[in-house]
Image: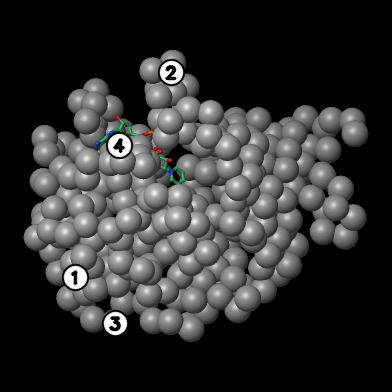
Amino acid sequence: MLYLTRADVESVGLDVQTMVGLLEVAFREKGCGRVEMPPKPGIHTRPDAFLHAMPAYIPALGAAGIKWVGGYPDNHRRDLPYITGLIVLNDVETGIPYAVMDCEWITAYRTAAATALSARYLARPDSRVVGILACGVQGRTNLEALAAFFPITRVFAYDTRRDVQDRFVADMRARLGVDVVGVDRPRDAVIASDMVVTSGPILKHPSPAIEAGWLRPGSFASAVDFDSYWTGAALGEFDKVTTDDHAQFEYYRRAGYFQQTPAPCADLGEIVAGVRPGRERPDERTLAVNLGLALDDMAVAPEICRRARDRGVGIWLPR
Ligand SMILES: NC(=O)c1ccc[n+]([C@@H]2O[C@H](COP(=O)([O-])OP(=O)(O)OC[C@H]3O[C@@H](n4cnc5c(N)ncnc54)[C@H](O)[C@@H]3O)[C@@H](O)[C@H]2O)c1
């Protein structure tokens, strides 16, 4: 069995375009009803924290396995990542596990790839200005993924921690070569943006900051942090709300989230498969609420494993 550390996973150099391509295949399969992915069960050892079991099988990609992932909003106080965990890949013929890998890098990028995939169907192709609210891991990867597909020229960045925001501004300016501006209020990251990503903590009882009237007509938003950032009135202004999976959306709604979010009109699989439309008019406000699916991980992890094997990366463990 191959074991890949976080550094091993990152070192194989899977680029964001390839990841979005893999997710597009996986979501098309999902839209055609050809994947198996039960809603994720979880346990909760601290308030607003989770440990989730996320299995999926994508026959077209020969991918089967599970992610066991934790999300702990207070980990930063211990200088630890918010998201941590492991992915196990299973052989589709025998069921035997053939790889175990750290899931931090994959989660960071596959979530961003899902935003970019949604944006390709739901954002205006000429979207140039991006607002990032919360400049942590997801803020960075989501911006990087959007920049791979859209002609971004300017970014407005907001984080409650000034040191995090300042580092984001300097790093992303250097990395992407675009104008990145730190702002003092959430409103300033929204009002002039064509695409908005919210990526703060997921809270069951949030105090949302984004108000009705802030998001311009024609804009796209990706709520990586569920409904934590958008007021009910702001959510009500979207012409199209989408998700990545209806069943998981309903599961979370029953668990107390999304109480004021309009019912999604489509999931990403339906949109990619052409069963339901993406953006239909330039002035639509569109929202992707991608909850994060085992499908995303299973689309990406086997390719990481193949590349690692080809390059001799990782540690072989006895069974
Ligand atoms: N939907 C998905 O598929 C998916 C996948 C992975 C992570 N997530 C979620 O994304 C969020 C971010 O994860 P991460 O790994 O980037 O965490 P992170 O700790 O790296 O970043 C979180 C950032 O949010 C900032 N922050 C806290 N409250 C804020 C507020 N009100 N406004 C602006 N900034 C604020 C923090 O200072 C920090 O910089 C978490 O809620 C996580 O659960 C979702």
What's under tag 3, amino acid-wise? Glu
Q: 208 and 47: which one is in front? A: 47
Q: Secondary structure at mark 2?
A: loop
Answer with left or right where residue 318 lies relative to residue 268.
right
- First in sequence: mark 4 or mark 2? 2
What's under tag 1, amino acid-wise? Gly
Please identify the quarter of the rendering in which residue 184 is found.
Answer: top left
Residue 24 visible in the current orientation = no
Residue depicted at x 26% and y 63%: 220
Q: Which mark is residue 135?
A: 4
Residue 132 image offset from top left, x and y in percent:
25, 45
Q: Which mark is residue 218?
A: 1
What's under tag 2, amino acid-wise? Asp
Residue depicted at x 45% and y 55%: 254
Q: Which mark is residue 79?
A: 2
Q: Report the quarter where the C terminus lies.
A: top right
Report, in whole angstroms, how far the alpha carbon at label 3 lies from the one at label 4: 31 Å
Q: Which residue is tagged 3? A: 280
In the image, the residue with mark 4 has its CB under 8 Å from the nearest atom of ligand 1: yes
